[in-house]
Structures are given as structure tokens and as C-alpha cells.
Image: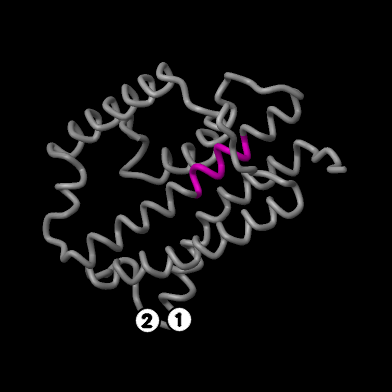
Amino acid sequence: MVREVKWTKYLWLSLLSFAAFMLEYLSIFGIEVIFLHVDIQNYTMQQRSIHCMIMVFMWAFFISVLLLFSIKHYHFPVKGNKRDIISLENWIVTLACFIGCKIMTFIDWHTLKIIGEAQGKTVFQFCMQYLYYIFEVMLVFLIIIYGQKAIETLLKKESPIPFGGIILAMTWGVFHFVSRGVGLEIWN
């Protein structure tokens, strides 16, 4: 018999997933300054790639431990079944949001972001940056998944309201809103 998991346990996993972003500060001000003698203010492109590699390893370790803990102690997430197929309507909404996002980044970058970021980088540097992005997105997904599960456990039912996305906005979103650029920018 599996005992019921309190909603706060899932919320903590969501918040821990957000806290994993702070490992970047450990890397920047601990590992890179003390061991590699690198100053964030004077990163070279190669040092930035090394930073991305360090973060990928740290985040991969964190994600693995968090998922193993969650599966062992809370039996979540579980493998889906055939009934959990995403509807055509949801795929269309997802595609529309993706296109909207690409339009916004095109306006911001004056090109496709992937093309703009590739300019002036070696293949290794570009790959390290996008590997970094992949693990960053994994943490974002964990915030959403565990946040949604927390609120649905509290409500004792599935909800069409994107509570996981709201928790993401209140954590990672707020942090990015105030940490990017000079002052508060609408595009953030």
C-alpha cells in the first residue's frame, strides 16, 4: 500500500528544483574563482564553455538525485500509459505558443536566436551553450511538474489551470525579470 504524499512534499521538490539554479553561483564564485582562477567579469569564450560544462555536470547530478528520490519515496513521476496522449488541440496551442516565442526572440535578436548565438563561436562553444540550455530547461520542467502535482494533490483532483507554470513564474520568472538587463525590461 502506498501512503498518500502531502502536497507540501511536491512543492518542496518544485522549490528545490528552482534552488538548483543557484548552483550556478557556487560554480561562478566558488569553483571557478578558487580552483580555475576565472573572473566572471572577464570570461573568455572558452571559459564560458567550461562554465557551461561545469553547470551541466552539477545540474545533471542534481536532477538525477531529485528524480531518484522522488520515484523511490513518492512514486512520482510514473510512466504514463496509452490514455495519457496529448490532444490535437493542446498540440496546436503548444505550437502557437512556440511560434509566438520565436517571433518575440526574432524581434529581440533581429535574427533567429540560434543563428545569432552561433555567430563568433566554435562548434564546441555553441554545443556547450545549448547543452547548458537543455539542462536549464529540464530544471524548468521539474519546477512545473512538481508545482502542478503539489497543487493538484492539495485540491485532490487534476486541474486544467497551469499551477506549475504559475509557480515557475513566481520563482524562475521573477528571478529572471529582475536579473536581466538594466532595470526592469518588458521583454523579460
Q: From the image, tell me which residue sits under label 1.
A: 34
Distance between mark 2 and mark 1 Cα atoms:
6 Å
> How many dots with numbers?
2
| Side (left or right) of 179 relative to 168 | left
Q: Is residue 10 above or below residue 63?
A: above
Q: From the image, tell me which residue sits under label 2.
A: 37
- Residue depicted at 60% across the width and 42% down the height: 79
Q: Position of residue 154 (x, y in %)?
A: 76, 28
- Residue depicted at 62% across the width and 40% down the height: 146
Q: Quadrant of the N terminus?
A: top right
SS assignment at label 1: helix
| Side (left or right) of 72 relative to 19 | right
Instruction: Give whichever of 46, 5 is nearer the camera.
Output: 5
Residue type at mark 1: give it. Ile
Crowdedness near tag 2: few (<14), some (14–19) or many (≥20) residues, C-alpha within 10 Å = few
Q: Position of residue 94 (x, y in %)?
A: 38, 25
Tag 2 near tag 1, CB within 8 Å: yes
Magenta extent: 139-147
> Predominant secondary structure in magenta?
helix
- The quarter of the picture where residue 153 lies is top right
